[in-house]
Image (tube, helix red, strand yellow):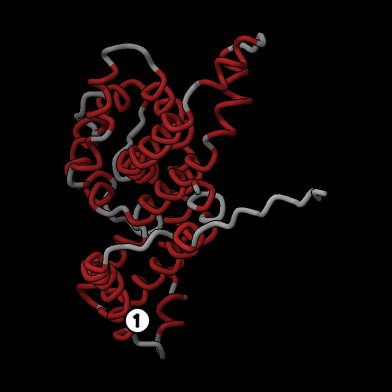
């Protein structure tokens, strides 16, 4: 007489449950890399004048620079999404051969020194620049050394971060679901909006975080294209640079503020961004 017994449950091996063991040699360079990143921040914490910290961070110049940094970084990030999202989709799904020559130009700000990017923007949109001369003569619009110049400089350096992240997500997702939607009668725009966008939201979130963090830390392109005018173009990184010459404690306090803002942005976005990729 036989009895029906439930099939034994297959238990995952410890390697799969806990992760495959790493070679021991990897821990040494990994620890060195972590130390290279963490120890400078620890140095800021140890060197900070904690007694003066509230006064330094609540000064009028610090609050003005913080407000300007947050506002311009937010606007620049929105521009990165509105412009970089379509660009990433074209690079990932476009069938034109000439697109292979576009990608290196899109990635150029990643390898250019930011001050070179700021100089290029100045030569383009300055009063004697290629487009700046037209804007100034015909419309009376001056871009350099304005808050708009800060936004453009931040967008210039941060846009590739969003494009790279989103393009990778689009290539990983593939286009099979959009093909199925097309066979069911969905238009290309409907398939993109209802199928593609939800699939790549983790990549979009990750790219948005990277772009915002890059905007918050932008210095070189900003000072070359927008200058350092308090309340107009002087963001936190520029204020840190100026305070470094006159008040080291203030520069350290502002640096810690930038670190805290960056950590908060990453912590808030991580559940939707990095964890969503797993």
Q: Is residue 157 left or right of residue 67?
A: left
Q: Quadrant of residue 76?
A: top left
Disc tally is 1
- x, y percent for residue 235: 36, 58
The foreground one among 206 and 173 is 173
Q: Which residue sits at x=51%, y=60%? A: 17
The picture quadrant where one finds residue 37 is bottom left
Picture layout, residue 64 above or below residue 87: below
Crowding near pointer 1: few (<14 within 10 Å), some, many (20+)? some
In this rendering, the answer to whether 107 lies above or below 256 is: above
Position of 61 with respect to 178 (left or right) is left
SS at mark 1 in the image: helix
Which residue is located at x 40 percent, y 62 percent? 65
Mark 1 = which residue? Answer: 45
Q: Residue at x 30, y 45 (%)?
A: 145
Q: Residue most toward the bottom?
A: 51
In this rendering, does residue 243 appear at all?
no
Q: Is residue 105 visible?
A: yes
**Front residue (pair 87, 127):** 87
Closest to the observer, 21 or 195: 21
| Residue at the extreme front | 1
Viewer-nearest residue: 9 or 255: 9
Residue 275: x, y in percent?
52, 53
Is residue 154 depicted above or below 216 in this figure? above
Q: Estimate the x, y position of residue 28 in percent, counting from the top left.
A: 22, 71
Which residue lies at the image location 28% right of the left edge and 55% below the top edge? 228
> Can you tell which quarter of the image residue 198 is in?
top right
Left or right of residue 90: residue 241: left
Question: How far across and how far down the image is residue 87, in percent?
Answer: 40, 26
């Amino acid at each position: 007489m036989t009895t029906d017994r439930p099939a034994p449950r297959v238990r995952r091996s410890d390697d799969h449950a806990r992760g495959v063991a790493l070679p021991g040699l990897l821990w040494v360079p990994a620890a060195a890399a972590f130390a290279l990143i963490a120890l400078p921040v620890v140095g800021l914490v140890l060197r900070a004048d904690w007694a003066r910290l509230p006064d330094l961070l609540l000064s009028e110049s610090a609050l003005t620079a913080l407000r300007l940094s947050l506002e311009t970084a937010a606007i620049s990030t929105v521009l990165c999404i509105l412009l970089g999202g379509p660009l990433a989709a074209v690079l990932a799904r476009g069938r034109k051969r000439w697109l292979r020559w576009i990608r290196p130009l899109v990635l150029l700000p990643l390898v250019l020194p930011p001050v070179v990017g700021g100089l290029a923007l100045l030569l383009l949109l300055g009063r004697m620049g290629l487009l700046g001369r037209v804007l100034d003569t015909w419309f009376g619009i001056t871009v350099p050394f304005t808050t708009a110049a800060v936004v453009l400089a931040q967008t210039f350096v941060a846009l590739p971060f969003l494009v790279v992240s989103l393009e990778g997500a689009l290539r990983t997702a593939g286009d099979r679901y959009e093909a199925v939607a097309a066979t069911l009668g969905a238009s290309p725009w409907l398939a993109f909006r209802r199928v593609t966008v939800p699939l790549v939201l983790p990549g979009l979130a990750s790219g948005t975080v990277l772009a915002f963090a890059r905007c918050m830390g932008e210095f070189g392109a900003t000072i070359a294209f927008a200058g350092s005018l308090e309340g107009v173009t002087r963001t936190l990184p520029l204020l840190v640079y100026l305070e470094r010459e006159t008040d080291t404690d203030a520069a350290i306090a502002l640096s810690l503020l930038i670190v805290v803002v960056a950590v908060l942005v990453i912590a808030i976005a991580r559940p939707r961004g990095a964890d969503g990729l797993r």
